[in-house]
Image (cartoon, coloured by chain):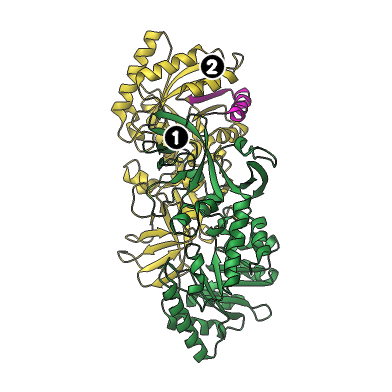
Chain colours: A yellow, B green
Amino acid sequence: MFPWPEPGQNLSDVPTPMAVIDEDRLAANIARAQAYMNAHGKAFRPHIKTHKIPAVARAQMAAGACGLNCQKLTEAEVFAAAGFQDILITYNILGPARLARLRALNDAVPRLVVCADSETTVEGYARTFASAKPLHVLVECDTGAGRVGVQSPAAAAALAGQIAAAPGLVFDGLLTYPPVGGAERVEAFLSETMALLAAQGIDCPVRSNSGSPDLWKAHLVPSATEHRAGTYVYNDRSMVRAGECSRDDLAMHVLATVVSRPTPTRAVLDAGSKALTSDLLGFTDHGEIEELPGARILSLSEEHAVVDLSACTAALPAVGDVVRVIPNHTCVVSNLFDRMVFHRDGVVTRVEDVAARGTVW
Amino acid sequence: MFPWPEPGQNLSDVPTPMAVIDEDRLAANIARAQAYMNAHGKAFRPHIKTHKIPAVARAQMAAGACGLNCQKLTEAEVFAAAGFQDILITYNILGPARLARLRALNDAVPRLVVCADSETTVEGYARTFASAKPLHVLVECDTGAGRVGVQSPAAAAALAGQIAAAPGLVFDGLLTYPPVGGAERVEAFLSETMALLAAQGIDCPVRSNSGSPDLWKAHLVPSATEHRAGTYVYNDRSMVRAGECSRDDLAMHVLATVVSRPTPTRAVLDAGSKALTSDLLGFTDHGEIEELPGARILSLSEEHAVVDLSACTAALPAVGDVVRVIPNHTCVVSNLFDRMVFHRDGVVTRVEDVAARGTVW
């Protein structure tokens, strides 16, 4: 029923609002990050939450990624069903229903790894898994982001000991999701914990660091064996602000139609929070518009974007014009659309199912 | 593949995060609003964007609604396919592809009405429709919300004249989406425009006002013939703040599991922006937690909610506990889930497809 575009169609004819991906920029983002990781001896594990599309993950693997990072159990199930064989779920997985599904997933995936930051989580894993096909577990460490994670190297080492002692579990190492600019603190936490583990006679083969904003600083954490990043694959306004990419590396735009010009300095687009989300990520407006430099998306309703044109330095738009919005945050846009449109040279190349859209459990 | 609940299942066993609807509160919200509208002689036209579920719209119609309000063309197509016969699309519909679909929709739906706020929009409608099955059009008026809409009664009357003059169109009247507390300005705009139209010999049968926050003030706009509202059906934290409802009228909760207790004053839930959205709606935090009064959801990642427990006045939660989050904004939560779980007395009663999820075109 929905008027999804077809390959070969002009991008200018695509219904709006529509999230669209530039094939060449996507390929360049994938290659650039992998080349950097190769040059610095880090394994690269892309976080697929940004696209949720098996074909894009295949491209990341083909470029040299060591495996995938998923955030939730059901997101991992989608990618396992699509054939991926090395999946890390960076989450505490809790409760009998989820643990039962995790056990089935572990039987199906050659290399599955999960995270834990508490004894409760580890006890759940230990009760559920047996040594025949043990569950691999990383201890998640809070290195300043203030989200999940054990709070100290000593706590990390203690939890690692609990994992290592469980017959059905394998302690694989350490993981963190640091704040921007946190390399020094990550290195300190990891190396202190590794020293404690060595003293306990516990191997720590994996030390997994992450983040797109500091992608090109991954080498500042020498103890990290791998780096995880999601946003880099499409990029967004926050990545340009972070200096992680240039505007030429923005692979995702949200195409929108100008549906109203109520006043000389106001335009309204058909891309509201249900196409862009209202994620500000520290910005005071909701995106940029390529064709309208200086214009500001001051507010979003669910299906409208109200644009202030008063500082726009280009020709003002007319009702019916289609513009390209650079979203503040790309990962959450992907999760709004059932399918994603890819294009090259103004022509639709393919339309992929966002296979893991909505996989929040 | 997804572990959707089944009728008869305990609500406490539902996978999280999950948006769930209390049947009795839902029914009461529907009945209460309709009774008020009946008492004040207003036709009531619910905005289905809040639920996007045909079965809920049927309940609203059964209670006495005059028809449905949809926001986008493809949202209306879903409800037309589900059998609804009186649909208002409160949007400027532009471009040949959408106009062609609108024509097909107009042929299929006994009573379809759209909006316009510019000559460009009306010209598109006029080119597309013929007198055999004309398109009914309301002029959308900006009564202070600063979004779309003509800017003055004179402009409204002029656009009405353009519509009335087109052989394939019928001018049905006026419509607005006012700011909260805007009743006086709405009444002034409508009555002034009606006077101008009367002087032009143009009938103005429909005057459509809207808003959930001012639902119980709809009678303060005597010139309005109908009222449109969406959020009232489920309610949310913003509606409690607006005084539109009490906490006992909150039909939607988002169930979430405590996945981590990293510090004595911090908890992390598995409901992030991909379950709640990051819509603040003027709040400084991202929702309330029924079981944890005083706790504050200070930040959301895509799949985590970081909760500050320092001011919590109840017993603190443990890893694995399930809590009920009151979202800041219910309408956008519905658009994140493919299906919606309904419950009564702690038991799942039904699971409905969110049939119009993602219909942004």
Point 65% across, 71% down: residue: B106
Nearer mark to the viewer, of 2 and 1: 1
**Residue drawn at x 66%, y 43% as measured from the top left:** B348
Q: Read off the magenta span.
A: A94-115
The residue at 45%/75% (across/down) is: B186
Q: Which chain is mark 1 on?
A: B
Residue with the mark numbered 1 = B268
Amino acid under label 1?
A: Val
Q: Chain of mark 2?
A: A
Where residue B231 sits: x, y (%)?
53, 58
Q: CA distance from mark 2 to mark 1?
A: 24 Å
> How packed is label 1: few (under 14 Cα within 10 Å), some, or many (20 or more)?
many
Tag 2: Cα neighbours inside 10 Å, few (<14), some, or many (≥20)? many
Q: Which residue is mark 2?
A: A169
Q: Position of residue A171 (x, y in %)?
A: 48, 17
**Which mark is on residue A202?**
none
Q: Is residue A36 above or below residue B67?
A: above
Visible in this render: residue A205? Answer: no
Element marked by disc 1? strand
